[in-house]
Amino acid sequence: MHTLLDPLARARRVAPDRTAIVCGDVRLSYADLWSRCRRLAGALQAAGIGPGERVAIWAANSHQYIEVYAGVPASGRVVVPLNTRHAEPELLYALQDSGARVLLTDRDPGKLVDAVDRVIRIPDEYEALLAAADEAELGVDIDEDTLAGLFYTGGTTGASKGVMLTHRNLIANTFHWMSGVEQRASDVMLVIAPLFHAAGSNGVLANIWTTGTQVVLPAFDPAATLDLIERESCTATLGVPTMLSALAEEQLVRPRETDSMQWIAHGGSPIATQILRRLHEAIPTAELIEVYGATELSPLATLHRNEEQKLDIDRGKSCGQPLPGVDLRILDESGRECEPGGIGEVAVRGPNVMKGYWNKPEQTDAVLKQGCYWTGDLGYMDEEGYVFLVDRSKDMIVSGGENVYSTEVEEVLYKHPAVLEAAVFAVPDDKWGEAVWAAVQHRAGHEGVEADELIAFCREHVGGYKVPKGVDIYPDPLPKSGPGKFLKRQLRAPYWEGHDRGVN
């Protein structure tokens, strides 16, 4: 097995002059990327940051971010990407928990300066350090089991944990991805998802391995994304459903030239069929690909290609089949494998499964059982191995003894012409224990839509116990985590105030 040194070394050897990264007005070749990663290693060495020590980065997407993401682990140190949407207490926790000695950031660090030995500001101080540093050897005294990164999961259901991913984890999952979707030197990958999250960074290593070009967008904006696709003739991108929904809306209203796009992948949370329909209408040349996984899986477990061809059949709602090299099963509470169609917890075995949670042995033992990572996701598998997700187990609504899967209700709400975003969750109910509730963002031009109309619409499509008892309607986007998942705990919180637990 390889380490993160290997994709950098191969790219420098076989395509030194090919464009590796485009970021604003900056264009770096693979020879540039190699040299800058070696100078980053030299700068850290001169600063007394030794092998195995943690280097945190809290910044928007940039070419410097990619250098840090690849170069820090290749130098034998551990990269700690921090969520730019986390509040200061959450960031302080991650820095203190990880023991990071250095923080690289493009913003005012505030109280974070007290949590590390040194803060290096991006871009000015970072660029000055690299300019003054000697190149240092990469790949010294590291192997596949060396820790490469600590990825703090903000999650949508609870406290942050540092996911320990080794070189083996990241490289193995890169090959899993490359075995499912062919990567070419001619690829121009548009990086729109935040690089602090696995959805943003999972394509970085594959692109470097195959010497494609990465076009980096500092922060997602649908108009800027389409402008870059047109200007750079981008061929592919990966984002979360909320991003792709916004992208489709912008393209349908103000179209750009997007015929260069060959595929658009999405992951992070289940996607409504209606979003896929509008995305295919907006960018018809692009194959639609779903990936499913978790940070703990480095991050990919399944792949579903050509979704645009399956929108009118049940399999169109699947997140795909397990990637080659990934063993995914649906297990019941006792650990027995469910029959096809039986709902259970998604469990994954393979070289991509994390080493564990940093400094959290009990939480590690709770999810690494029977040689598998238990994802906390509920789903089922059909006779051909297609996986269908029904919900996060922690977000499942139990109303009057009946299980309600929020994605099913969200799917209905997305079919209403007034609904742009929808999130469904549980609220306490004296009679039924829990009741179904929804929050939606209305589309422009549908400001007059009322909750009763949406409730009646749902009643036409799902059983009575699944119909929302209420709908909160917002003019602005619903709150999301850094990776773009809906913050259901935030939407739910006002209704559970005064209750000593979050289920009823």
Image (tube, helix red, strand yellow):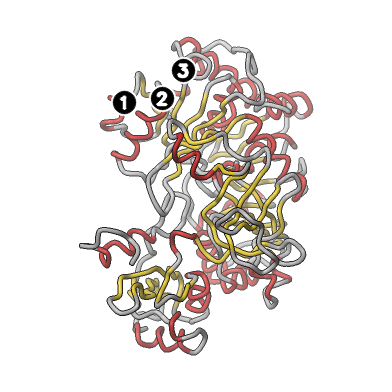
Instruction: Give the mark, 3 or 1, whose residue is nearer the N terminus.
Output: 1
Q: Return the mark for residue 115.
A: 1
Indicate which label's residue lies in the foreground, 3 or 1: 1
In percent of width and height, residue 364 lies at 49, 39
Location of residue 126 in the rendering, given as x and y in whole percent from the top left corner: 45, 23
Q: Quadrant of the N terminus?
A: top right
Q: Residue at x 60, y 55 (%)?
A: 346
Q: Is residue 252 left or right of residue 421?
A: right
Q: Amino acid at mark 3?
A: Leu
Q: Residues within 10 Å of mark 1 (few under 14, many from 20)?
A: some
The residue closer to the viewer here, 458 or 396, is 396
Residue 7 in the image: state x and y as whole percent. 70, 30
In percent of the image, x 30 and y 75: which residue is there? 429
- Give the residue number, with chain letter if any, for mark 2: 100
The label shown at residue 129 is 3
As drawn, which residue projects farthest toward the front?
334
Q: Give me the residue at 67% from left, 59% from top.
A: 289
Earlier-in-chain disc, 3 versus 2:
2
